[in-house]
Image (cartoon, rainbow, N blue to C red):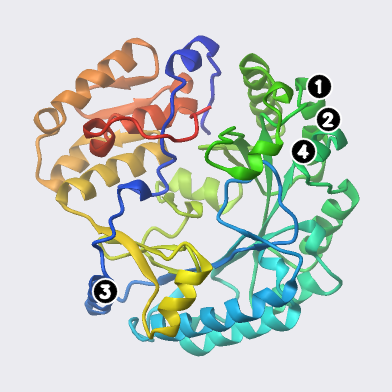
């Protein structure tokens, strides 16, 4: 179990902007010169690997009925449900086109619908989307895949969950953020406890195996006392996983956030106190800290994978499927195929134009070189397991760690003196006080950050 220490002085000293490392290199390094032809080559090359690499499919459904003011996701806010039809038509065509690149024997071990709000679309459209996917890809039919969907409890209609379960979904995550009515009003997300917990109860009855809830700290009008009341209710309900995200107020980058008044936000100290309370309460309730805002019950597969040393991190966050090629489908989706990352067009107009023109909607991407792959492995090990076996890295990449990373090791020695980590010739081990600052430790190994001036990311805490 990963013990955590909240050290306010350390957090203040290391509180700077940094990436979340759902990929390395991060998406800001993707280039427009990465073409559809290059993506096709990378995808098809994967078919020659024995045994066949399984697949992970991510589908982006960008529509939302109302805008949550804190949101920084790529979305289309509309009350007009008919807008989904042309989008899904293009998505079906992309599915068919992408499937041609992947051998049919490659099994889809992982599948995820994200958004936006996937439950924005009608039941008939959900059925159709899964039918099209099943026609073109080799989906599992034994309920042993990791097939998940993001749910907005306010969008769950009668029979929605039963349909999703029949379609093969066995995991779901739902946004809660905060139950306090004053906070909900300030962020334009009015969602009752009753409708939230009704979804949880029904999902359990239907046999969904892993149910996750999302909370956000740092929202307007939050306090230790008010967030504590929300935590009481969540802990009492006992979801399998919890994500507790830090709200990053960047109104100059995300237009909806301009509706949030900066003076209504909790002070940095209050935010830290809320975080400390959250960690204490969840730990006392038996949740394991996985890392990067995520907690899970000890018997949840994320916690098991972390104990086994098989945990991985990708664009959906922490994952148990490190061996998959990830195929991103839909507007703005990111895939990871072979030694490359690829992102689809970011606007509906450009996405539609690419599909209508007979193309895959590739906008940008990157092919990893040997240095990228080495650093990705190091960052993944640290962010998933809070330790790095130096000898294993030296052996698998044919390097001498102390020479290759002499600059980085000098930075790590400062962190060692500050109590963030322990380090010797054979290993780097993150200490309890360093676990909340794991992004800072990973940033030391980010060559792109080192070479460029600092870009804007959300603060690490």
224 sits left or right of 279 in the view: right
56 or 255, which is in the foreground? Answer: 255
**Horizontal and vertical percent position of residue 256:** 65, 44
158 or 212, which is in the foreground? Answer: 158
**Horizontal and vertical percent position of residue 415:** 33, 17
Q: Residue furthest bottom?
A: 135
Q: CA distance from mark 1 to mark 3?
A: 52 Å
Q: CA distance from mark 2 to mark 1?
A: 7 Å
Q: Earlier in the sequence, mark 1 or mark 3?
A: 3
Q: CA distance from mark 2 to mark 4?
A: 9 Å
Q: Which residue is mark 1?
A: 225
Determine whether label 2 and label 1 are within 8 Å by CB: yes
Q: Which residue is mark 2?
A: 229
Q: Earlier in the sequence, mark 1 or mark 4?
A: 4
Discs 2/4, front: 4
Q: Is residue 233 above or below residue 97?
A: above
Q: Which residue is mark 4?
A: 178
The kind of secondary structure element at disc 4 is loop
Q: Could you tell me which residue is drawn at 61 percent across and 34 percent down?
A: 247
The kind of secondary structure element at disc 1 is helix
Q: Earlier in the sequence, mark 2 or mark 3?
A: 3
Determine whether label 2 and label 4 are within 8 Å by CB: no
Q: Could you tell me which residue is drawn at 71 percent across and 27 percent down?
A: 281
Q: Could you tell me which residue is drawn at 71 percent across and 67 percent down?
A: 119
Q: Is residue 69 above or below residue 220?
A: below
Discs 4/3, front: 4
Q: CA distance from mark 2 to mark 3?
A: 50 Å
Q: Residue furthest right?
A: 194
13 or 279, which is in the foreground? Answer: 13
The kind of secondary structure element at disc 3 is helix
Q: Which numbered circle lies on residue 46?
A: 3
């Amino acid at each position: 179990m990963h013990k955590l220490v909240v050290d306010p002085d350390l957090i203040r000293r290391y509180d700077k902007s940094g990436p979340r490392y759902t990929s390395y290199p991060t998406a800001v390094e993707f280039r427009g010169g990465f073409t559809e032809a290059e993506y096709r080559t990378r995808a098809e090359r994967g078919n020659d690997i024995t045994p066949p690499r399984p697949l992970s499919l991510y589908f982006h459904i960008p529509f939302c009925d109302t805008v949550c003011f804190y949101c920084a996701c790529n979305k289309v806010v509309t009350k007009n449900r008919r807008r989904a039809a042309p989008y899904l038509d293009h998505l079906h065509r992309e599915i068919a086109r992408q499937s041609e690149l992947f051998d049919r024997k490659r099994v889809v071990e992982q599948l995820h619908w994200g958004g936006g709000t996937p439950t924005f679309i009608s039941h008939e459209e959900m059925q159709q989307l899964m039918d099209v996917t099943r026609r073109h890809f080799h989906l599992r039919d034994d309920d042993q895949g990791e097939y998940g969907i993001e749910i907005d409890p306010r969008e769950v209609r009668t029979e929605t969950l039963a349909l999703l379960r029949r379609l093969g979904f066995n995991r779901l995550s739902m946004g809660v953020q905060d139950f306090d009515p004053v906070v909900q009003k300030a962020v334009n997300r009015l969602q009752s406890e009753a409708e939230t917990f009704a979804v949880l109860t029904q999902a359990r009855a239907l046999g969904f195996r892993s149910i996750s809830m999302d909370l956000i700290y740092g929202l307007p009008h939050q306090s230790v006392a008010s967030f504590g009341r929300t935590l009481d209710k969540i802990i009492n309900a006992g979801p399998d996983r919890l994500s507790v995200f830090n709200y990053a107020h960047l109104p100059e980058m995300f237009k909806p956030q301009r509706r949030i008044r900066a003076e209504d936000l909790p002070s940095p100290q209050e935010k830290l106190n809320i975080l400390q309370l959250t960690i204490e309460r969840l730990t006392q309730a038996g949740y394991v800290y996985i890392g990067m805002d995520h907690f899970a019950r000890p018997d949840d597969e994320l916690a098991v994978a972390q104990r086994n040393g098989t945990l991985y991190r990708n664009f959906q966050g922490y994952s148990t499927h490190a061996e998959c090629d990830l195929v991103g489908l839909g507007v703005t989706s990111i895939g990871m195929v072979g030694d490359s990352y690829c992102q689809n067009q970011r606007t509906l107009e450009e996405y539609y134009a690419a599909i209508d023109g007979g193309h895959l909607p590739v906008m940008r991407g990157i092919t990893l070189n040997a240095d990228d792959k080495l650093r990705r492995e190091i960052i993944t090990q640290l962010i998933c397991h809070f330790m790095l076996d130096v000898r294993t890295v030296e052996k698998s990449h044919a390097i001498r760690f102390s020479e290759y990373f002499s600059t980085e090791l000098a930075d790590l020695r400062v962190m060692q003196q500050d109590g963030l980590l322990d380090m010797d010739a054979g290993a780097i081990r993150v200490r309890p006080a360093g676990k909340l600052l794991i992004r800072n430790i990973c940033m030391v190994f980010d060559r792109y950050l080192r070479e460029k001036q600092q870009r804007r990311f959300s603060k690490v805490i």
